[in-house]
């Protein structure tokens, strides 16, 4: 057990990238991680500039992940990095994660886990044979009021769960910006770099993970309609799915990136026999509960009535809004606790999504694609056995 600050390396996240900067801020937030090395871009000059801007020693700004792994593995244990954070486009997740795990490093990886389920299984096998930890950035599970929602469902406040409705509505891909130089849009619509799913893999996986995480139920079968609205786009930009979950619960999942004008509209509703809940990502500090026999309740971050495990995920008092970076930081805090075997807060080391979540989300992607392309009404969502060490 150790509570020392852990040393982090980053793959991706160079100048102009989106999510790398969020990871860096989140990892730094609780003082458990320090970024000391990286390979930030495939372009050497951009990589060098990025390392310099971030205050990384020139000798630890590497021109490739292979160079990083070789050099870091050769450093004394007290200097080498503990984990690699992978924040590149999706096609690099599997090769980079497998190489890093095999070289003896823990890996915290962006979603989707890989291009497909087969690659995800290879990551799972590498984690099992290396004995190293693998975390996945399903960010939304890190929000305090998502934890409150999960607690309320699991302790039976609403009775048996009947309905799980999740919607992730974005509009930023409504036009062909992927062919007009938008870097983030460009790789997300290229099957070689995004994977089997477009919108499905990019945000459908977030919605699916959130729905299973909060409801505590697994999706067993689904019926899907996958569409591409923007002409000549090579991957889906819109998906609708009917879900059959454990215990007879029914659900719907809508994910779209062509809802013109929408920002980041992730919304979850879950209902049981006596009432239900609603949480929306753009108002993350509010959780609404509705009941058959009494008025609705509004729970607020830091306010009264919250579970202990929710309060532990908050850093500021009521009325001081927390958001995306803090949710990410909860995942980094959990990953640090798992790696250093130092869960000062009981259970904190379980707060991050891992292999099983990754495999289930990739099985979801493949089942949706198979179902949408076939005439059959329902397709089973089958993950297969988890690889063991
Ligand atoms: N969890 C979330 O909420 C969330 C949000 C956004 C993106 N993501 C995921 O994060 C990942 C990155 O997305 P983004 O929007 O930041 O993409 P981006 O295009 O903005 O950034 C990708 C970065 O990877 C770098 N890169 C590419 N090839 C590289 C290589 N060989 N070596 C080193 N660096 C390399 C690029 O130079 C760039 O800096 C994707 O997998 C995406 O799905 C997750």
Image (tube, grey):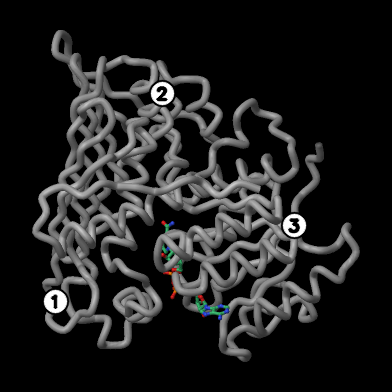
- Quadrant for residue 4, please give it: top right
For marks 1 and 2, give the CA distance: 40 Å
Mark 1, residue position: 230
- Quadrant for residue 242, please give it: top left
Residue placed most toward the observer, 44 or 296: 44
Mark 3, residue position: 82
Residue placed most toward the observer, 302 or 32: 32
Give the residue drawn at x 60%, y 76%: 40
Give the residue drawn at x 60%, y 52%: 134
Mark 2, residue position: 151
Note whether 68 is above or below 106 in the view shown: below
Mark 1 or mark 3: whose residue is earlier in sequence: 3
Q: Residues within 10 Å of mark 3 (few under 14, many from 20)?
A: many
User: Where is residue 182 drawn, in percent x and y?
Assistant: 32, 81
Q: Are marks 1 and 3 in contact (CB under 8 Å)?
A: no
Q: Quadrant of the N terminus?
A: top right
Q: Is mark 2 within 8 Å of ligand 1?
A: no
């Amino acid at each position: 057990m150790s509570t020392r600050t852990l040393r982090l390396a980053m793959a991706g996240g160079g100048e102009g990238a989106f999510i790398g900067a969020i990871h860096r801020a989140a990892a730094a937030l609780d003082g458990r991680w320090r970024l000391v090395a990286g390979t930030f871009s495939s372009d050497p000059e951009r990589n060098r500039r990025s390392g310099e801007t971030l205050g990384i020693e020139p000798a630890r700004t590497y021109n490739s992940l292979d160079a990083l792994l070789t050099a870091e593995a050769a450093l004394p244990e007290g200097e080498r990095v503990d984990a690699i954070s992978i924040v590149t486009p999706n096609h690099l997740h599997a090769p980079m994660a497998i190489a890093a795990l095999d070289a003896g490093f823990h890996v915290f990886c962006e979603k989707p886990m890989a291009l497909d389920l087969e690659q995800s299984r290879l990551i799972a096998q590498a984690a099992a044979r290396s004995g190293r930890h693998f975390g996945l950035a399903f960010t939304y599970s890190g929000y305090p009021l998502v934890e409150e929602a999960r607690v309320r469902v699991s302790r039976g406040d609403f009775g048996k769960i009947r309905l799980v409705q999740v919607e992730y509505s974005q509009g930023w891909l409504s036009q062909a910006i992927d062919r007009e130089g938008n870097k983030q849009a460009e790789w997300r619509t290229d099957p070689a770099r995004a994977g089997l799913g477009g919108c499905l893999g990019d945000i459908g996986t977030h919605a699916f993970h959130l729905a299973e995480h909060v409801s505590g139920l697994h999706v067993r079968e689904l019926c899907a309609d996958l569409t591409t609205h923007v002409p000549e786009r090579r991957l889906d930009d819109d998906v609708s799915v009917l879900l059959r979950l454990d215990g007879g619960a029914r659900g719907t999942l809508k994910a779209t990136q062509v809802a013109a004008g929408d920002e980041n509209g992730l919304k979850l509703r879950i209902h049981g026999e006596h009432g239900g809940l609603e949480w929306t990502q753009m108002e993350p500090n509010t959780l609404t509960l509705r009941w058959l026999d009494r008025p609705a309740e509004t729970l607020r971050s830091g306010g009264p009535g919250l579970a202990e495990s929710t309060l532990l995920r908050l850093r500021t008092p009521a009325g001081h809004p927390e958001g995306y970076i803090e949710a990410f930081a909860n995942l980094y805090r959990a990953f640090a606790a798992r790696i250093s075997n130092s869960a000062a807060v009981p259970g904190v080391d379980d707060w991050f999504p891992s292999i099983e979540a990754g495999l289930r989300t990739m099985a979801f992607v493949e089942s949706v694609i198979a179902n949408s392309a076939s005439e059959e009404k329902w397709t089973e969502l089958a993950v297969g056995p988890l690889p063991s060490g």
